[in-house]
Image (spheres, rainbow, N blue to C red):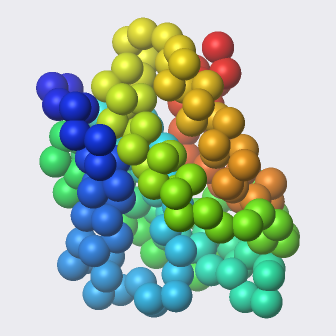
Amino acid sequence: MSMSTNDENLGYRWWIKVKNAPVVSSQIPLEAALSYPVCAQGELRLFHYKVSDGQIIRPFTFIRAPLPDVEVSELVIDYHGKLFPGLPGEPGVYDVEFDSARRTAILNLIPSLAQKYSREPAGETGQTFLQLFNQSVPEALKPFYEALNPQFFQWLSN
């Protein structure tokens, strides 16, 4: 995959592109939150979830967006809890404070991680991502992120 990661806002722009893709925006409620991207071989994977009265409502979409164009190639919507088998029906409490600067920092690490993924060690970029990710993502949602690509999180931890 050939892509330039010199643009410091590329990751944020990728995320907005997925969020605003017509196939997504025409079918997903505005109040639904879009996850951070998880790198997989040649693509990004994401999901939507809702928060109601501080409780996370089970993720209900699965999205694939191939790199480097980040055009949504697959959108699966399931309101019956079958997208993440074996994970809790209602994940739990949204127990972290939202920080837009931290969100932007996480998103803008994604292009570098996508370029390195499975080719070389994640290094300092991976450690920074994990630190910010752990500060930003509620514990109750982490298993859903890991389900998108468990190998990505193993790679980050090595």
Identity of the residue drawn at 43% across and 49% down: 107
User: Foreground: 108 or 51?
Assistant: 108
Q: How many marks?
A: 0
The C terminus sits in image quarter = top right
Q: Is residue 142 left or right of residue 3?
A: right
Quarter occupied by residue 112: top left
Residue 10: image x %, image y %? 27, 47
Q: Is residue 41 visible?
A: no
Residue 76: image x %, image y %? 42, 68
Residue 26: image x %, image y %? 29, 87
Say above or below: 109 vs 124: below
User: Foreground: 108 or 38?
Assistant: 108
Quarter occupied by residue 140: bottom right
Say above or below: 91 vs 2: below
Say above or below: 126 vs 95: above
Identity of the residue drawn at 52% across and 81% down: 32
The N terminus sits in image quarter = top left
Q: Is residue 125 left or right of residue 111?
A: right
Residue 139: image x %, image y %? 80, 54
Q: Is residue 129 visible?
A: yes
